[in-house]
Image: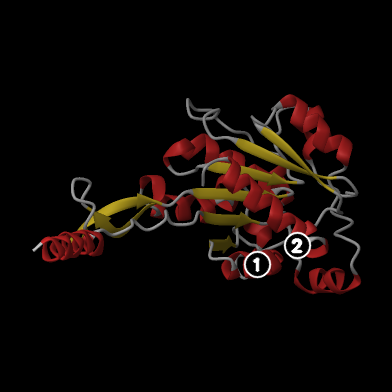
Amino acid sequence: MGEESTEVVEMKEDRSLSNSVTPPPPPPPHFVLIHGIGGGAWCWYKIRCLMENSGYRVSCLDLKGAGMDPTDPNTVLSFNDYNKPLLDFLSSLDDNHQARAVGFSRRFSVLHTDTPLDMCVYVILVGHSAGGLSLSDAIHKFGTKKIKLAVFVAATMLRSGFVTDQDIKDGVPDVSEFGELKEDSTLAAMLLKPGPSYALTTTRFVESDETDNVPRIYIKTMHDNVVKPEQQEAMIKKWPPADVYVLESDHSPFFSAPFLLFGLLVKAAVAYGC
């Protein structure tokens, strides 16, 4: 009788274990990558490949008149018009980018396919060069309701836009150079388009209560001839980010140092709980 009693207890324990379900890990963050002046979504092809192969969700956008967008950039006369694709994209996402996922009963920890639970998918904005203006605009307009983290890669980072002559000196890229690797320079020469310079250099932002709530990270490119290190440092001092990462690369690390840039973007995501 004693042996039979022991067997019954063991079977009950096995059943309880079989009914428990481990909740799934949180979904990976959604990286939204924004190009600089004259560029396009195509600039990010190496980073997108690395991210998607690692399980991240990635969106690379063409701003108005850039990349595959058919708009003549000479007709883009305001920054609001130029940045509309990013603002429309963020507006299309639910607040805090809620993704429907299979849910779990908090009381019983048992899988219920008929009781979905919202799981937050964090949005990380990444802007390169003049694309930093697009990030600042989005931060002012959406704040933490849409954006978890903003990463500026050798990017223009001005709290209020181009208000003073010093802002222009610090934040306007020298677009006469776009990198040193021959293959990628050839690609850029084939795909780069004129940018709406007037719309960009007259950009000014209206701040909101959310402006300082979105953490920012700046990635300095130490061998940059487009947004020079001293320009980057001046912008960092004016509007200090939460963190500064250093990359030994030229202005376009998505071409010249994609693995290093990818590593820093993942590091940023992990550091801020994404």
**Residue 169 left/right relative to 215:** right
Residue situated furthest left in the rendering? 1
CA–CA distance in space, label 2 to label 1: 8 Å
Give residue 220's mark. Answer: none
Nearest the eye: 44 or 5: 5
Label 2 sits on residue = 258
Nearest the eye: 224 or 115: 115
The amino acid type, in three-letter code, at marker 1 is: Leu
**Residue 172 left/right relative to 160:** right
Identify the image quadrant of residue 194: bottom right
Instruction: Return the x and y of residue 40 as percentages of the image width and height.
Output: 67, 63
Instruction: Return the x and y of residue 124 as percentages of the image width and height.
Output: 55, 49
Looking at the image, tell me whether mark 2 or mark 1 is earlier in sequence order.
Answer: 1
Of helix, strand and loop, which one carries label 1? helix
Residue at 70%, 68% in the rendered image: 46
Residue at 67%, 69% in the rendered image: 45
Establish if 208 lies above or below 139: above
Residue at 25%, 58% in the rendered image: 20
Instruction: Return the x and y of residue 13 as percentages of the image width and height.
Output: 21, 59
Are the two marked residues, 2 and 1, in contact with CB atoms closer than 8 angstroms? yes
Residue at 75%, 31% in the rendered image: 236
The amino acid type, in three-letter code, at marker 2 is: Pro
Nearest the eye: 37 or 8: 8
Give residue 50's mark. Answer: 1
Of helix, strand and loop, which one carries label 2? helix
Is residue 112 visible in the rendered image? The answer is no
Establish if 233 lies above or below 197: above
Instruction: Return the x and y of residue 171 as percentages of the image width and height.
Output: 78, 38
